[in-house]
Amino acid sequence: MKKNEAVSNVMSNNINAIQQGQPLSEVRHMMVDNNIHHIPVLSGEQLVGMVSFTDMMKLNVVINGADDRTIDAIIDQQFQVKDIMSKELITLNANDTIRQAADILSENNFHAIPVTNGGGELQGLVTSSDLIRYLSDQY
């Protein structure tokens, strides 16, 4: 196992992202349709936040038996992406190491780190699943 291997070798770079002004229901559908738990939020090309599955679960929307259209309408009426996204993010650069990514994930108890370039533009995402796959490939 290479201690100083770049995070760019394990990051997902074909990621789903959403613009800050898009409806929150689109985040919900991206997560469900693509079986993903973290969606970066952009303003143009700049990373401004992250919405996790946990953030979505915190929306106190209790609708027994409602269909998807009704749920989407209620979510979009009551909340905006900027209301639930995490704004203070820890990010990595593509040249940072896999070890740094593992340390950040374990120390902060979250499961995804955005990878940005020097200008704050999103380049990829490193998840705990990416690191587990990397570790599995080593053995």
Image (cartoon, rainbow, N blue to C red):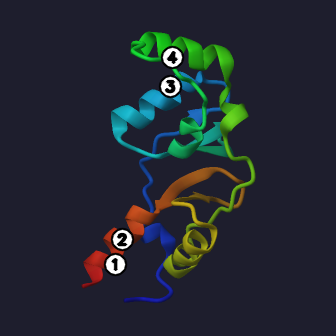
* Residue 82 spot, x, y in % from top left: 71, 33
Circle 4: element type: helix
Circle 1: element type: helix
Residue drawn at the location 46% of the way across and 46% of the way down: 37
Q: Are circles 3 and 1 on residues that touch, CB within 8 Å?
A: no
Furthest-right residue in this view:
88
Residue type (three-letter) at the residue carrying disc 2: Ile
Please name the residue that numbered disc 1 is placed on. 135
Q: Please state which of residues 85 and 10 is positioned toward the viewer in this rendering.
A: 85
Q: Are circles 2 and 1 on residues that touch, CB within 8 Å?
A: yes
Image mark count: 4
Whether residue 46 sits left or right of residue 61 in the image: it is right
* Residue 123 spot, x, y in % from top left: 55, 54
* Residue 122 spot, x, y in % from top left: 60, 50
Relative to 139, say whether 12 is above or below. Answer: above
Tell me if mark 1 has few (under 14), some (14-19) or many (20+) residues whose alpha carbon lies within 10 angstroms of its own: few
Q: Please state which of residues 40 and 79 is positioned toward the viewer in this rendering.
A: 79
Distance between mark 3 and mark 1 Cα atoms: 33 Å
Please name the residue that numbered disc 4 is placed on. 72
Q: Nearer the viewer, mark 3 or mark 4?
A: 4
Residue drawn at the location 52% of the way across and 75% of the way down: 102
Residue type (three-letter) at the residue carrying disc 3: Glu
Please name the residue that numbered disc 2 is placed on. 132
Q: Are circles 1 and 4 on residues that touch, CB within 8 Å?
A: no
Q: Are circles 2 and 3 on residues that touch, CB within 8 Å?
A: no
Please name the residue that numbered disc 3 is placed on. 26
